[in-house]
Amino acid sequence: MKKVLVIDDSALMRRAISDIISQDDKLTVAGTANNGFSALEHLDAGERFDVLLIDIKMPKMDGVQLLREMEAKHIRIPSIVVSSIASETGVETIEALSLGAMDFVKKPISSIGENFAEFRMELLEKIYIATGLDVVKSSFHAKPEPKPTVSFGTPIPRRPRKTIKGSKLVVIASSTGGPKALQSVVPFFPAGFPYPIVVIQHMPAGFTNSLAQRLNEMSPLHVKEASDGEELKAGNVYIAMGGKQCELVHRPGGGCVFSENDKPPRGGLRPCADIFFESLVESSYEEIITAVLTGMGADGCSGISLIRNTHQVKCVAQSADTCVVYGMPRAVVEAGVADKVVPLESVTEMLVRESGVK
């Protein structure tokens, strides 16, 4: 049985989360705390837990402060932030992820209905990932995912628009563990990098703008959340908007603009890297340089395979030993799509090299 510590100042939420965990035969609630200070007392007393579920807004010591204290005390326990989507918590949630929380789950609007059922499934899945349990065989996956509609099936490759010689685009795909991993990638692109960079990070609405702001503070390049209708410009880093599908629309006269739209999730993902890559099939870019970072599943693999039929494509995969979850990189490696496999700290250097920038 994997031991869970539930940390939340709401007695109702502690009860709701505890009930979810108690109904799973591989998990047990080994303790609860109503703030970070109380949680730290559990940890300082030597109590052992396999995963912590941490709220952000709490009295005495909030979730971010708790993670800072854990880092200072060298307490290494997988942690998942359970946060609301209120804008005032977005910055703190991104900070928590940068401090080592491996993932986060949005709190449900209510404790009943479809929204709560989705919360339950997502929470259990992420606890399983954090504790090394087999997600595929777990009972909470009994409900099958709906198949994507025909209109969002993999398109037949067509001849791309006339390519513009020397034009290049860098695309980075990431999921679980991505917000922290991106801090080891995006800030290390050199000032004056001559190509646009697009980041597809799996995230719900309300958080990607905070992620972009944090990365912008750390980076020599301008980092921003992508906006619908915005034209891509060289040397900018664009974070795909959370809760939307991100695609490129190619203008007849040249150039590309973002389409941040409400097309349905694919495999539960919005944004979905495969959908973004599919939008590049008819692009005028001569070369597309990609990186696939930590994350569960295989998003990005089929999309990169597709654009290899129409473009010059290079793919860098993050190495297994530096991933929080070796899923997405494993997919491109096993499919023979990855050209290079490097540790996280070498990803930017490899992307710059593959871009031909000296």
Image (tube, rainbow, N blue to C red):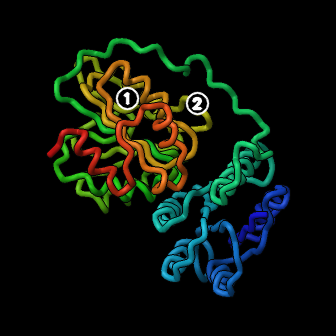
Q: Which residue is mark 1?
A: 248
State which tag comes first along the sequence, 1 or 2.
Answer: 1
Q: Are marks 1 and 2 in contact (CB under 8 Å)?
A: no
Provide residue 229's location: percent of width, then percent of height.
35, 32
Could you tell me which secondary element the residue under label 1 belongs to?
A: strand
126 displayed left or right of 95: right
Q: Amino acid at mark 1?
A: Leu
For residue 268, above or below residue 352: above
As drawn, the label of residue 264 is 2
Q: Quarter holding the N terminus?
A: bottom right
Q: Amino acid at mark 2?
A: Pro
Mark 2 nearby-residue class (10 Å; few <14, some 14–19, many ≥20): some
User: What residue is drawn where x is 85% and y is 56%?
Assistant: 23
67 displayed left or right of 125: left
Provide residue 271's location: percent of width, then percent of height.
50, 38
Provide residue 228's location: percent of width, then percent of height.
39, 35
User: What residue is drawn where x is 66% and y is 85%?
Assistant: 41
Residue in front for this viewpoint, 23 or 36: 23
**Residue 108 in sight from this viewpoint:** no
User: What residue is drawn where x is 18% and y is 39%?
Assistant: 356
For residue 88, above or below residue 249: below
For residue 41, above or below residue 158: below
Q: Residue furthest left?
A: 358
Using the numbered discs, state the Cα–Cα distance from disc 1 to disc 2 in whole angstroms.
16 Å
Residue in front for this viewpoint, 57 or 138: 138
Provide residue 77's location: percent of width, then percent of height.
60, 70
**Residue 346 in sight from this viewpoint:** yes
As drawn, the label of residue 96 is none
Residue in front for this viewpoint, 205 or 38: 38
Could you tell me which secondary element the residue under label 2 belongs to?
A: loop
User: What residue is drawn where x is 46% and y is 46%?
Assistant: 174
Q: Determine which quarter of the picture holds residue 30.
A: bottom right
